Image (spheres, rainbow, N blue to C red):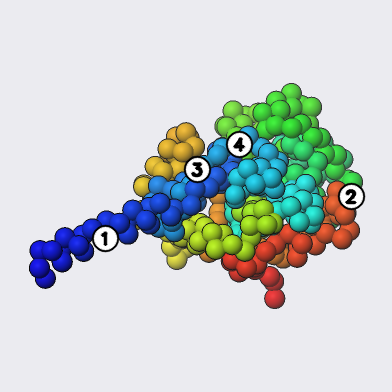
Amino acid sequence: MTRAHLFLGLVVATLLAGTASQAAEKINIGLVRSPASAPFYIAKEKDFFATEDIEVNLVHLNAWQTIAAAVASGDVRFGMMAVSAEIYGMAAKGAVKMIAGGAEEHPGYRGLALVANRSAYEQGLRSPADLQGKRIAITDLGSASHSQLARLARKHGLRPQDVQFVALQTVASEIAALKAGDVDAAPLPAAYAKELEDSGAATVIAWMGDELSTQVAGLFAPADARRQGLTRRFVRAYVKAVRYYTQAFQRRDQDGKPVRGDNYEEALRIIAQHTGEPTARLATTLPYLDPEGTIAGDDLAEQIEIYKALRLLDARVDANTVIDGSFVPVRMKK
């Protein structure tokens, strides 16, 4: 190869690299600053999005409902949010669709705990079977925890109306009401549940993951953007990050005990960097993610039926109106 040919080759390579860089599509992702958003932090730091020619801006919002509105309006291209009656209703109207799975309650993982205050526990509230007539704090009617608790009551032979749900808007308010004795129990994230139990103010009487395998969150896109090539590339990067997360945190030995993956320390550092949580606290509160980011279609169908029974969803809503199965498999019970 002559020097002139070599120079020409270098020029062409430089121009092509510049064109590829310019082609990277810039998008916003809506999410809550939490361990449940871990795949996005990993995909950004490990350049999984960049490999798909996507430049991502992580937009942290304060509430799932805010994210849903931002996705529907197009202010963010994709959003990770907890499922709820409101989200299902929006999906049924064609505003958003779930395109991949997110955090789940899963046996052996410490996600959401049902916690009884000291007085209620001493008076016999020792398990979900003892919930009849009790006051349980939740953030909102129609929230994910509302559905989970209603399903938990049904599992133990109770009707949703046998339990009094008290909507308090925030987890902080739930904790305050629990301590004051204004409610008998509350569903709380593992870290808060452990703090209350360690202080003697309350006792964990059930772990939701051990009681009910539940799809808690999902990746959503606006209806008019679902089938574009960008969405397929984005989901591919997301699933790659979920696999990385699985390798780091979800390996088990022959006895079912956790085994740290080779990328454990790096993954934990990335999540801590974006959430601001100490690594020691994160290590005990990381949620379960399906290793391939699939959607638990059968579970979503059951959630929807519960919301209908609670008169929080229109009878015409079903899982098919919520899910777009074009990008990841949808799991169904055989």
Residue 294 spot, x, y in % from top left: 59, 64
Does residue 15 appear in this view?
Answer: yes
Residue 149 spot, x, y in % from top left: 76, 47
Q: Quadrant of the N terminus?
A: bottom left
On the image, numbered disc 3 is attached to which residue?
57
User: Could you tell me how far apart the alpha carbons at marks 3 and 1 are, in whole angstroms?
Assistant: 28 Å
Tag 4: amino acid? Leu
Tag 1: amino acid? Ala
User: Could you tell me how far apart the alpha carbons at marks 2 and 4 are, in whole angstroms?
Assistant: 28 Å
Circle 2 sits in a helix, a strand or a loop, which is it? Answer: loop
Q: Residue at x 26, y 61 (%)?
A: 12
Q: How many marks?
A: 4
On the image, numbered disc 2 is attached to which residue?
311
Tag 2: amino acid? Arg
Lower position in the chain sequence, tag 3 or tag 1: 1
- Tag nearer the camera, 3 or 1: 1
Could you tell me if the residues under marks 3 and 4 are in contact, i.e. CB atoms within 8 Å? no
Lower position in the chain sequence, tag 1 or tag 4: 1
Tag 3: amino acid? Asn
